[in-house]
Amino acid sequence: MASNLDTLVTVFGGSGFLGRNVVRALCKRDYRIRVAVRRPELAGYLQPSGKVGQVHTVQANLRYPASVAAALRDSHVVINLVGVLTESGAQTFDAIQARGAETVAKAAAAAGAELIHVSAIGADAGSPSSYAKAKAAGEAAVKAAVPSATIFRPSVMFGPEDQFTNRFAALARMSPVLPLIGGDTRMQPVYVGDVATAIAEAVDGKAVPGATYELGGPEVLTLREIIETILEITDRERMLVPLSFGLARFQAAVLQFAPGAFKLTADQVTMLERDNVVSDAAKAASLTLEGLGITPDSLEAVAPQYLWRFRPQGQFQRMSV
């Protein structure tokens, strides 16, 4: 009987937020994993995710096709998780999420490997957002090169070390007032562990070949409701000040150069103008977490496990009287 250890899975972007969760999920299923990243010397923390020798890191850069082809040599399954939330130097949306996705797909096709590609809900060639347009271009390139590829479109992901809930919690710790951009925009926050499980299920062969899955959590919440939940979890009382999209773009002209949690780009503002939820079509076709047999975890159930560090009393939440 064949073992999963006979299957080599190459994960591009395996050291990132989603990537490290995918590596752990695959390790639990006994796959051999090759993690392809730009700086393999900084990804040593992935080694304890599996047994001795189960995880191996190699150098690859999606902007250099030869490195991509070398990284996935002899692979049975290729997973592309690489993406950028903001552009920096040569790391542009087009270079990474469009042309980079095409590079991985063509290399996977040449190697005869199965391909799993992670995009995002909101990917749309007609979107005013450069991020969303690049994601759509990447999907199109993947389908052209590998028609049987499985594409996953998660909504905004949360979990330890995310750049979403941790960002708002950090801002609330530093400021008594929080700007609210797109407070009525609806999202379907999805736990990163559930997305990783969905990808592992696809590696197991349980996803529909050539299908596009949309992954969302159990609740559809407005951005205001999400921030209010974060404030409740972190035991903070903060004033939420709604900002128009026009004013937010004006601020982004300056805040695009800000560090850490204060960074805001015009493209991020544009993305906040559209809802980020699982479509009715995906639900009707069972191309969702539930369709893969996964019961998604809610923000309220998971976030307290890691956001407690932002409470004034640390893990000891204030008792009501």
Image (tube, rainbow, N blue to C red):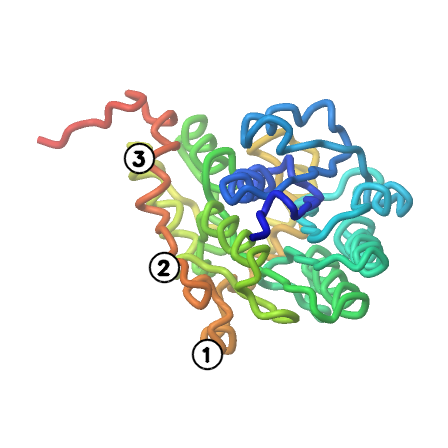
Q: Position of residue 151 (x, y in %)?
A: 63, 63
Count neighbours of disc 1 (C-alpha within 10 A) and say few if under 14, some if 14 to 19, many if 20 or more.
Answer: few
Q: Quadrant of residue 57?
A: top right
Could you tell whether 51 is left or right of 65 in the image? left
Q: Position of residue 273 (x, y in %)?
A: 56, 61
Could you tell whether 42 is left or right of 233 in the image? right
Instruction: Point out the residue furthest to the front here.
Output: 1
Count neighbours of disc 3 (C-alpha within 10 A) and say few if under 14, some if 14 to 19, many if 20 or more.
Answer: few
Label disc, if present, on residue 237 of the rendered structure: 3
Vertical placement of residue 207 versus 13, above or below: below
Q: Which residue is mark 2?
A: 219
Marks 3 & 1, CB-CB < 8 Å contact: no
Alpha carbon distance from label 3 to label 1: 40 Å
Helix, strand, or loop for circle 2? loop
Q: Which residue is mark 1?
A: 284
Which-is-in-front pick, marks 3 and 1?
A: 1
Quadrant placement of the C terminus:
top left
Q: Position of residue 40 (x, y in %)?
A: 74, 28
Looking at the picture, tell me which residue is in the foreground, 285 or 71. 71
- Between discs 2 and 3, the one toward the N terminus: 2
Amino acid tagged 2: Glu
Helix, strand, or loop for circle 3? loop
Instruction: Point out the residue furthest to the left here.
Output: 321
Which-is-in-front pick, marks 2 and 1?
A: 1
Count neighbours of disc 2 (C-alpha within 10 A) and say few if under 14, some if 14 to 19, many if 20 or more.
Answer: some
Vertical placement of residue 140 versus 244, above or below: below
Alpha carbon distance from label 2 to label 3: 23 Å
